[in-house]
Each structure stands twice: as C-alpha cells, then as structure tokens.
Image (cartoon, helix red, strand yellow):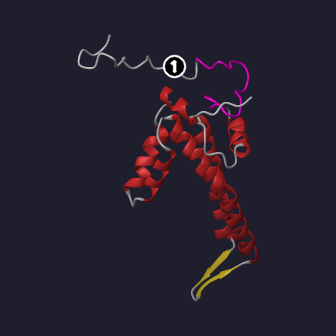
Amino acid sequence: MSNPQYPSQQPYPAQQQYPSQQPYAGKEPPLWAPYYGAPFSAAVKRVFQKYATFSGRASRSEYWWWTLVSVVVSIVLNIILQSGVQYTSYGSTAGPGTFIAGALLVIFGLATLIPSLAVSVRRLHDSNKSGWMILLGLIPFVGGIILLVFMLLGPDPRGQQYDQPTA
C-alpha cells in the first residue's frame, strides 16, 4: 500500500524477527555480523576479537555481557583498593596492596577503554543510530540516560547499512 501523496515511496518493510531469523542457526555467526542471543563467553570473546573495530553492529547481548564484565571487574578492583586503606582519627593511610590494586584498576581501565567505546558504537549501529551519538554521553545528567535508552533499543533492520561483510 503506497501513500497517495508520495506515490514512489514504498511502505516500511516488515520488521525482521530477531534472533529467530538468524541465518547462522546452530553456529556462531561470522565476526562481522552481530551475534543475537550471544552466550556470555562468546560475547566477551567477540569484544576482544573486535578490539578497535568501530564499524559493523553489536547485538544487545554482546553489549550487555561486556558491560556486566566491565562493571564486576571494576567493583572487585575497587573493593580490593579500599580494603587496603586504613582509616584513623588522623586521616587515612594506604597499605601495600593499595598501590597494586590501584595500578591494576588503571591498567584495566586503559586496556578496556577502546573496546568499550567500540562495542558501544557498534551497539548504536545495530539500532540504526550514528556512532557519533556516543558523544551524547558528554552532556551532563541527561546524556547518560539518553545513551542508556539507545542501548536498550532493539535491532533495526536498517542498521545493516553499517555491516561490512568479509569472506
């Protein structure tokens, strides 16, 4: 059914059903394709395999499993860091483990900065948003909320424009 006002314009195609229409049923899709319903280990492995790949798409499961790993590791390192601090009435002093935990926290943060940005950009691509939308996170207060909503959005078939299939 076409719009009489715009006769050349076709209606939107029917929404594809994800993940049931995956052409890779029973096996992991190629690295350039999003892995809908990715299990924990596959999702984390794919983030590191696509360390600095900002093109293509990432499924919600890839993004959220990676986010879970990042948050849990950061919390554990922060707990270790805080457990080495001794509080007294004169102030606080750092124990010997504090330096090591602090160094590990900095190393982890630096090592995962690029893959975290890359998987976020690919997640935006999956919902047919420009990767530059990640800069919305720089807006105080509302930027993070807007990005959270974008990361929760389902896949949009028009996001396939960001795919770059390889052999």
Q: Is residue 96 left or right of residue 135?
A: right
Quadrant in the picture for the C terminus: top right
The answer to whether 74 is drawn above or below residue 38 in the figure is below
Residue shown at 67% from the left, 68% from the top: 81
Element type at marker 1? loop
The location of residue 130, given as percent across then percent down, is: 48, 43
Image-quadrant location for residue 43: top right
Q: In which quadrant is the N terminus drawn?
A: top left
Q: Nearer the viewer, residue 8 or 37?
A: 8
Q: What residue is shown with label 1?
A: 17
Which residue is drawn at the image coordinates 69% and 73% (left, top)? 84
Q: Residues within 10 Å of mark 1 (few under 14, many from 20)?
A: few
Magenta residues, start to end: 21-38
- Specify whether residue 138 is in view: yes
* Residue 70 percent location from the top left of the image: 63, 52
Left or right of 162, for residue 12 = left
